[in-house]
Amino acid sequence: MFFERHEGGERAILVHPECVDDQQREDPREFQELVRSANVEQVAFVVVTSSKMTPRYFVGSGKLEEIRQQVIANEADVVLFNHALSPSQERNLEAELKCRVVDRTGLILDIFAQRARTHEGKLQVELAQLEHMSTRLIRGWTHLERQKGGVGLRGPGETQLETDRRLLRARIKSIKARLDKVRKQRDQTRRSRQRADIPQVSLVGYTNAGKSTLFNTITESDVYAADQLFATLDPTLRRLPINDLGPIILADTVGFIRHLPHKLVQAFRATLEESAMADLLLHVIDCADPERQDNMQQVQHVLEEIDAHEIPQLQVFNKIDLLGMKPRIDRDEDDKPYRVWISAQTGEGLDLLQRAIAERLGDDLIHEFLPVPHNQGRLRARLYEMGVVQSEDYNEEGVPVLEVRMPKMELQRMVLQEGATLPWDLPDLEPWMQE
């Protein structure tokens, strides 16, 4: 029951309200980007002032007539509003304009319907669509006001509208049950990673900030990335070795946007939990975007909604190549990195980003010279495989000594797996290596 959509090529009239209230204000450029991402052709752009808005049509009578003339002159297929409309406003506008009317939420849902690729993603989009449509049902079959009675003609005694609502509720219940199953499977996989002591890092940020490009560059993957809003819907996880730290799980997630519909947040909760359960969030920010401060605040709002706002964050200011800047790490008063300037497109600063991740996750990072006897070849190989060995030398007895930088708990776990013990109170680590 996944809703079909037109295959692009639609001609649209764009209506943008100029709101005085900053909390309700929408960005007209972002609206046009949403329309472009939906593969819709813009044929006219109408601006409405907040003082002219009415409860019945959202716009005043003068603007309503202007939009009607634009629809006729441009032979438009749809009118798109850069604001949420009530169900009654949509119905009233469609009756007056004689064409489809879609608000901002419906436009975002349409983009999500185009982008969903996996079975889970399609389920999540359909759930959001159904919940959005459940308030917009109208009686479409006027000849079925109530089913007739009589022998062979008795029905459930429902109007067509009631039947539609009942079918919608049943479908919503079915999808939620399937998504609950997906969430349990994700929880099981996440617990397996936690038992293996592999930290998880999630990419979050405003849509089109460059998360997927960064993900592809740093993990050498081929996740779909494009210069369009909501290019990524389905979460992708990759194992990534980090010098001085060991392996981490890096997750690429859906981008956020201002006034992200609550229905979408709820529908994509199974996906967004990858961020809510992370050990560190990489907040990717388009540093060349003049609206970056506002975008950062919008991301924080969504993180609060999914209870992920208290997870440690590392800001990643991306696209420095557009500003002609050099990569660098910004540190706080405790010398802890809180911001890294990079370019995911050119690869500049990715080494600094990995170093900052290692520092933020490696609070118990140790720097030791470890004698590794020849009979501990597997331990030596694993240390090299993790990329934590800085140098190698030999002591007076001819035993290899490795200079390592890595988390204390990770080293302890590896040593125990090799059947040795690690007395941390001993300044000299040679005795436990010779057991």
Image (cartoon, rainbow, N blue to C red):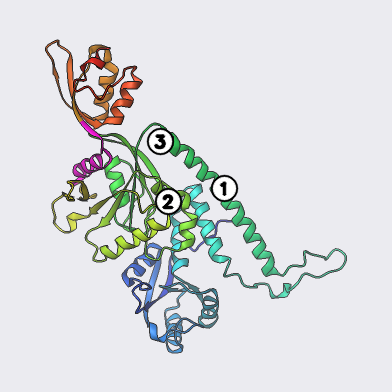
Q: Amino acid at mark 2?
A: Leu
144 or 49: nearer the viewer:
49
- Measured in 3D between alpha carbons, the distance from the residue under mark 2 to the one under mark 3, in whole angstroms, is 18 Å
**Local crowd size for mark 1, using a 10 Å CA cut-off: few (<14), some (14–19), many (≥20):** few
State yes or no: residue 323 in magenta.
no
Which residue is drawn at the image coordinates 83% and 66% (left, top)?
153
Q: Which residue position is annotated with label 2?
A: 272
How many marks the image carries: the answer is 3
Looking at the picture, does residue 99 appear above or below residue 410?
below
Q: Which residue position is annotated with label 1?
A: 178
- Picture coordinates of residue 240, whole percent (x, y): 31, 37
312 or 339: nearer the viewer:
312
Q: Quadrant of residue 92?
A: bottom right
> What element does badge 2 sit on?
helix
Q: Which residue position is annotated with label 3?
A: 194
Q: Which residues are magenta?
A: 348-366
Residue at the front extreme of this rendering? 425
Which residue is drawn at the image coordinates 53% and 52% (left, top)?
123
Q: Is tag 1's residue or tag 2's residue first in the polypeptide sequence?
A: 1
